[in-house]
Image (cartoon, rainbow, N blue to C red):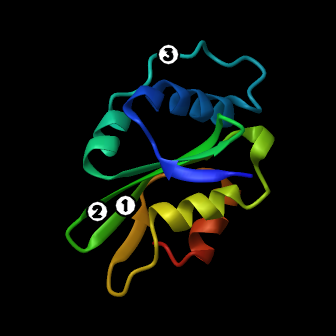
Amino acid sequence: MTLLRPARNDEVRQLYDVWYRAEMFANPNPPSPGEAPIYLAHVLATGTLLVAEEAGAIQGFAGAISRGNIAFLTDLFVDPASQSGGLGRALLDAALPPTGGQTRCTLSSSDPRALALYIRAGMQ
């Protein structure tokens, strides 16, 4: 059973590892993983950063920050082994729930499946 819960400070590296696996999945010659980006700690401190955990392992994560009347999805990544099972939608709904009058958006994505999810969720 998958548990959605707030991320902890000591999990930022694990979140980066999920990102790396998701982004480099189809790359036959991926670069070496680097350091976890410091912005994840900023999202954790100033916004919402959630993880999807199953059997003690992080399967995905989502981050969001609200500024005024706009809620920004900063991240939504699911480990390739856990994709296409609704986990991304569950993380999106938990991190960025629909609210009356608030614009929900994201600034960057090149994944056609992610874009379709965002459009279905009414994001801009």
Which numbered disc, 3 or 2, marks the residue that appears first in the sequence?
3
Which numbered disc, 1 or 2, marks the residue that appears first in the sequence?
2
How many neighbours does mark 2 have within 10 angstroms: few (below 14), some (14-19), or many (20 or more)? some
Label 2 belongs to which residue? Answer: 66
Instruction: Give the residue type that dot 2 points to.
Output: Ser
Comparing marks 3 and 2, which lies closer to the viewer?
2
Which numbered disc, 3 or 1, marks the residue that appears first in the sequence?
3
Measure the alpha-carbon separation of dots 3 and 1.
Answer: 25 Å
State whether residue 46 is above or below residue 122.
above
Discs 1, 2 touching: Cβ within 8 Å: yes
- Which quarter of the figure has residue 101? bottom left
Measure the alpha-carbon separation of dots 3 and 2.
Answer: 28 Å
Q: Nearer the viewer, residue 31 or 6?
A: 6
**Residue at screen point 39% across, 81% down:** 99
Side of 123 relative to 70 (left or right): right
Q: Which mark is residue 72?
A: 1
**Residue at screen point 79% across, 39% down:** 81
Q: Position of residue 10 (x, y in %)?
A: 42, 26
